[in-house]
């Protein structure tokens, strides 16, 4: 393709050592590092837009970015072109040409997040990087009973932190469930949008249900209260992965 | 317990940033860091023996160490006593008093290792720390057919690297199988002892079978050859975990 055109790319990163996706005044942002690598590879200044601005310490396997470029390099060659320009914890997975009207954030129809919780009564230095380590064994059944209440269109104010610029706290969840493999619990949630800190706040509450501190009815009451103060502690960033962003076919 | 006595402890570590378990002339050894933390906590010089001397980059959830001490601190308090003295990637999990004749290495009756392989056609910065990333999808069935040949008493010379001080290349494997969870493949092997680099050499060969480069008969022929040159590349250290060491009841 010649002339100025728009590219959509899927990127993956281990967020442990970053201040989040966005450029920060202090610390390192993933956006900045991707922009530098793409600018070098494509030999022009590249400014990217992202589907979701993940927080400090949050990981991604399916973050989507878009940007305009005049580079003659075919997008299918971008992965190799930037691989040696990126640190080991950031990777470009796929890239393709899209219509110029495409916007990674505004065109997204749904996003899928995964959250990993590891039940480990003993310290586990190999699990703590990508999971929330808990010392009490959670009930998969209770967590799934509460998670099922999330599916559908609801006001999620109780799980929203201040600091977001969202106008409406109403979102639709298409899927919300837990799977278990050994001592590892995987929470999958797919929805048309997420409020600030929503997934981590939800997981904090669902684990309270799993470990018997709350009943499923308590969880439902917190959700209905629309009061963030009821929901308590957010789950740590390290267990959260942005897995996938969908766009209209 | 008063006076000089012997303690057995289970330790876990993320081996990524270490030169292996043993003290090295250059770089950091896990043994050294554990000895420093225990010496500080128990207020006397502590020298430890370990069940297995894991290589650089290899992880452990169930490494066993033993040492003599005169400290009056009860072993069940060691975990908390050393937690703040150890880096985030090393942990003492459990400790108990044992008879003075106990030796972590010579008394071990079997050891269990796990090796993780991740099938990821796209780069995955979050999987590479604890797994071998492969780009071709392996056949679980073929890998299990080959793994089954390992069970029993055999000469494992074909899978032994030079550099070991072992006298006999004959070992007995009680268990050797692969499990799959999504794109992640877990190899579990339990035996009365392992030759130098044996598990990583085995996994390198089993993945050749899984991806169709070798037949199960090829694998059997390599094993029977007792010739290390036939076996090819070892799997990388990052996927290997020492999971458990058993002792006589």
Image (cartoon, coloured by chain):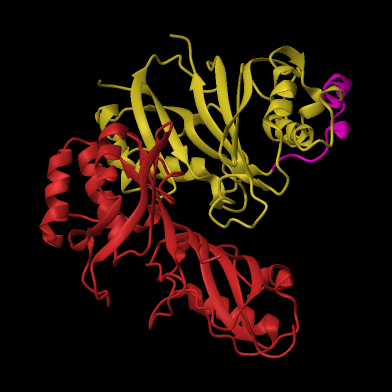
Chain colours: A yellow, B red
Q: Is residue B149 left or right of residue B103?
A: left
Q: Position of residue B185 (x, y in %)?
A: 38, 39
- Does residue A220 show up magenta in the picture? yes
On screen, B245 above or below A27? below
Give the position of the C terminus of chain B as an image quadrant: bottom right
Q: Position of residue B58 (x, y in %)?
A: 41, 61
* Residue at 45% from the left image edge and 74% from the top image edge: B105
Tell whether B132 sits left or right of B36. left
Rendered view: A159 above or below B44: above
The image shows residue A139 at horizontal and vertical percentages of 71, 33
* Residue B243 can be seen, yes or no: yes
Relative vertical location of residue A98 with respect to residue A137 in this rendering, above or below? above
Quadrant of res B226: bottom left
Question: Would you say residue A195 is visible in this rendering?
Answer: no
Query: Is residue A201 or residue B72 the one in the foreground?
Result: B72
Residue A185 is left or right of residue B199, and the answer is right
Query: Which image quadrant for residue A5?
Result: top left
User: Which residue is drawn at the image coordinates 63% and 57% (left, top)?
Assistant: A123
User: Residue A244 at what x, y percent from top left?
Assistant: 50, 25
The N terminus of chain B sits in image quarter: bottom right
Determine the main secondary structure of the stretch shown in magenta. Answer: helix
Is B65 displayed left or right of A232 in the figure? left
At 33% from the left and 64% from the top, the residue drawn is B194
Is residue B73 inside the magenta stretch? no
Give the residues drawn in magenta, as a range.
Answer: A218-235
Is A212 placed above or below A216 here? below
Nearest the camera: A157 or B139?
B139
Q: Residue at x 51, y 22 (%)?
A: A245
């Amino acid at each position: 393709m010649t002339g100025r055109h728009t590219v959509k790319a899927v990127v993956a990163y281990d967020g442990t050592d970053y201040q989040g996706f966005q450029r920060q005044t202090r610390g390192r942002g993933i956006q900045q590092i991707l922009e530098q690598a793409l600018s070098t590879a494509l030999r022009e200044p590249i400014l990217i837009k992202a589907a979701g601005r993940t927080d400090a310490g949050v990981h991604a396997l399916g973050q989507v970015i878009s940007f305009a470029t005049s580079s003659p390099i075919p997008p299918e060659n971008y992965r190799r072109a930037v691989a040696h320009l990126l640190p080991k914890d950031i990777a470009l997975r796929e890239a393709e040409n899209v219509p110029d009207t495409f916007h990674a954030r505004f065109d997204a129809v749904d996003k899928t997040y995964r959250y990993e919780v590891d039940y480990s009564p003993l310290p586990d230095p190999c699990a703590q990087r990508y999971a929330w380590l808990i010392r009490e064994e959670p009930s998969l059944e209770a967590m799934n009973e509460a998670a099922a209440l999330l599916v559908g269109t609801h006001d999620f104010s109780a799980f929203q932190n201040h600091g977001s610029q969202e106008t409406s706290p109403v979102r639709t969840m298409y899927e919300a469930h837990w799977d278990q493999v050994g001592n590892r619990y995987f929470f999958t949630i797919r929805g048309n949008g997420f409020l600030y800190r929503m997934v981590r706040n939800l997981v904090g509450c669902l684990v309270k249900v799993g470990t018997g501190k709350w009943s499923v009815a308590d969880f439902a009451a917190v959700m209905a209260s629309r009061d963030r103060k009821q929901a308590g502690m957010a789950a740590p960033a390290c267990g959260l992965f942005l897995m996938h962003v969908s766009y209209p076919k």
